[in-house]
Amino acid sequence: MTHPTAVREAARLIAIEAARAYVANIRPIDLTNPGVLVGHLMAAETLLMEIVDAHTEPTEEAAA
């Protein structure tokens, strides 16, 4: 499925800004608590997958 270029660019910016906001709000992490570490890793993985998806989905220009 293709999306208009403006929509894809917006999705890219939103994904990147979401990752930046998450990182900016991380407080010191208790490295002895595996649950907290796993939670941060899972959140980071999800944000990275969203960034990759936003950059790999085709736009109308790429489909032409």
Image (cartoon, rainbow, N blue to C red):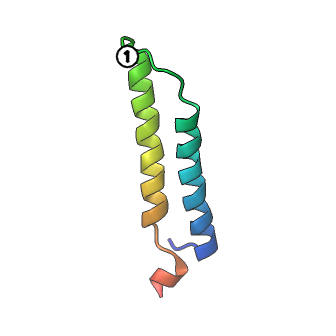
Query: Viewer-proximal residue, 46 or 31?
Result: 31
Amino acid type of the residue that numbered disc 1 sits on in the rendered structure: Leu
Figure quadrant of residue 41: top left
Q: Mark 1 points at which residue?
A: 31
Query: Viewer-proximal residue, 51 or 25?
Result: 25
Secondary structure type for disc 1:
loop
Q: Is residue 14 left or right of residue 47?
A: right
The image position of residue 28, as x and y in percent, is 49, 21
Name the residue at 62% across, 68% down. Answer: 7
Can residue 36 be seen in this snapshot?
Answer: yes
Name the residue at 58% across, 59% down. Answer: 13
Q: Height in image: 10 above or below 33? A: below
The image position of residue 53, as x and y in percent, is 45, 58
The local crowd at label 1, few if under 14, some if 14 to 19, many if 20 or more residues have their Cα within 10 Å, is few
Can residue 4 be seen in this snapshot?
Answer: no
The image position of residue 8, as x and y in percent, is 57, 67
Q: Height in image: 50 above or below 32? A: below
Q: Height in image: 23 above or below 2? A: above
Name the residue at 45% across, 20% down. Answer: 29
Count up the numbered dots.
1
The image position of residue 54, as x and y in percent, is 49, 60
Q: Which residue lies furthest to the top in this view?
A: 32
Query: Viewer-proximal residue, 20 or 44?
Result: 20
Name the residue at 52% across, 37% down. Answer: 23
